[in-house]
Image (cartoon, rainbow, N blue to C red):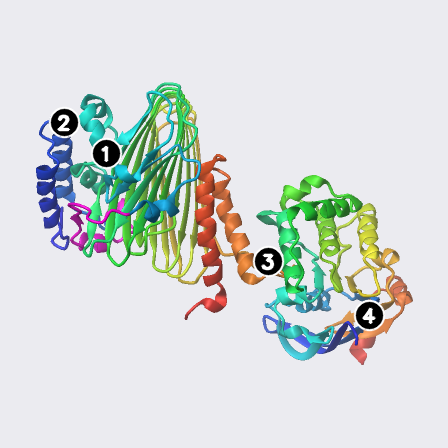
Amino acid sequence: MSLLEIKNLRARVDGNEILKGVNLTLNAGEVHSIMGPNGSGKSTLAQVLARRETYEITGGEVLLNGKDLLAMKPEEAACEGLFLAFQYPVEIPGVSNAYFLRSALNAIRKYRGQEEMDAMDFLPKLREKMKLLEMDEKFLNRSVNESFSGGEKKRNEILQMEILEPSLAILDETDSGLDIDALKIVAKGVNSMRSPERAMLVVTHYQRLLDYIVPDKVHVLVDGRIVRSGGPELALQLEDQGYATIESAAGAA
Amino acid sequence: MATATQALQHYLEGFTSLEKSAPSHQHPWLRKLREDGFARFGETGFPTVRDEDWRFTNLSAIAQTPFRLVREVRNLPSQSDIAPYHVAGAACQLVFVDGRFAPELSSFGRLPDRVTITNLAAEIERRPAVVEQHLGRYLNIQRDAFSALNTAFIEDGAYVHIPKSVVLEGPIHLLFISLAHGAPTVSHPRNLIVAEENSQATIVEDYVSIGTGEKALCNTVTELVAGDHSVISHYMIEREHGQAFNVSTLRIQQGRAADVSSHSVLIGGALVRNNVHPVLAGEGSECLINGLFIGTGRQHLDNYMLVEHASPHCGSRQFYNGILDGHAHGVFHGRIIVHKDAQKTDAKQTNRNLLLSDTAQIDTKPQLEIYADDVKCTHGATIGQIEENALFYLRSRGIDETSARRLLLTAFAGECFDRMKEGPARKHVENLVREDLRRIAYSSRPEERVA
């Protein structure tokens, strides 16, 4: 059984159809990349999978570990093992990072029939992972993403991923706004999460990230459909030639 | 002028019977206070929406109800009845039932020497000259009909006197209980707090109901005199049941460098009006007004504040946070008067509101009257909903919708908690509000809404 099966997924928002029949299969242990020009639907795909209710599903089906993902609420999808690293993580004043993460972890543990973790056990684990991501401990008591730089926000996404241990991690343009040093730290964190039980979907516009997070497969999303799939060399070809050739080929098809 | 639609006759009956049962003739000053109060109320009756200060609050439910004084309480609550209302860590607890002191339910810890915490009626008998110095000297009965009415019916309430330089550690808990009597009843608690130079204390006024099913009006006035360099925290918590009417007035008089924080937490009641009126009479005094109001159903929560800068170099910060759901209606009227000689005034006012339903409503009105020319005065208001992006972010991490809403509502209320000094009073308020928000987070979800 594949970890993720997307069959003919169609979705629209504000009356505009963005996803026009996406097909994709992802097996445990694999890292796939989704690339595409702006407006192709990359972020929409990520948000639809994470069950954002502003997007209306107009067709198709998605199975996560054999279960109907589209029937799930966002919190159910998360408890079933889906994690989305946001492109633009939101700030939540008044809710501390530590409290938020522990609440999330315990919600998921509870769903899985595991014991909740108390602060005594949780904080050392959290601190250890923060150290690896070169995040200052003072972030613990700060509000979620409040006054974080772009790079700090992205690292906070990876920190959450490391704590929540999803089976399917979707990274939505995790590289955007990062300098090369921050990028390396983030990539290190992502790569440390690779495992035979886990799959990742790396959504990116630029090829650069894929030098550090090398995918098994690359898919190109154009105008709401995957029009080309290939190995990592496809990403290098795109970097060379840009999206124009693929777009016109897709348009002609 | 009093209008024919107001049922005022029974107030005259009440006034007459009060004079019989708690005569003030041995204290001419008290008699005069009551008579002036009653005369003034007779002139104006209850305010209507044509009064600028009551523009958003329709008082016909109060004006047309024949509220009567409670003559005697037959079934006093028991110690176990009031146990749920304790404040852990309080220095003492004074309990008032329908506006009258209930010594059998009250408890006094070990208080420092010369601190007087007792009921007003007792102190009027014991030291009338001392009480006369302050009682009624600050409240403006011309300005407000409820103040006049309360003054007409002065009978009992709390009397607190903190001598020079005394620091009282735990909060003074004043618990006001309304009972159900099978007919609409009214009480007029009158509190007087005098804090001398350099003293420090925390006072918590807590309004609760025992028994339901009947309208009750609590019309309370507190005069708080904060001496030079004193540091006083005052809390007003309104958590009566859904048929209660509560009008409260806190009139504060601040001396030089006096630091007063007034925290109001309105979570109960059908129609609630809270007036906070500090006068910064001494140079360099500071006032923090920190209000939180949470309304659901058809609650009407009206927050009125009037800060008077009467002296130079004084600062005031006013923050009101409102959460409104269902068909609740919140009002914020923030008045600041900067008198001619109050140079170097620094006043800041912010009202933030969260509307959880399409039918919730907030009226927010700043009103700045500035007569000095070297001042800093700012005001701002926001009206919003629970941030959709924040809600989704929390849910995408596995937190269910109700818990996510509760987290966000608590964070919003948390802005108010953060302005309260750490201690038993703050803890008490946090616990009450968290419990209230737990309920609201569940019932305010979109699918719970009835069209």
Q: Are marks 1 and 4 on the same chain?
A: no
Disc 4, SS: strand
CB under 8 Å between callouts 1 and 2? no
Q: Are marks 1 and 3 on the same chain?
A: yes
- Magenta-drawn segment: B51-77
Q: Chain of mark 4?
A: A
| Numbered circle sitting on residue B305 | none
Q: Are marks 4 and 2 on the same chain?
A: no
Disc 3, SS: helix
The residue that appears at 59% across and 67% down in the rendered structure is A54
Asked whether A152 or B122 is in front, the reply is B122
> x and y percent of residue B77 in the render?
28, 47
Amino acid at dot 2: Trp
Q: Chain of mark 3?
A: B
The residue singled out by tag 2 in the image is: B29
Amino acid at dot 4: His
The residue singled out by tag 1 in the image is: B140
The residue singled out by tag 3 in the image is: B389
Gap between marks 1 and 4 measured at Cα: 76 Å
Q: In the visual, does B245 lie left or right of A158?
A: left
Dividing the picture into quadrants, the one containing residue B190 is top left
The residue singled out by tag 4 in the image is: A219
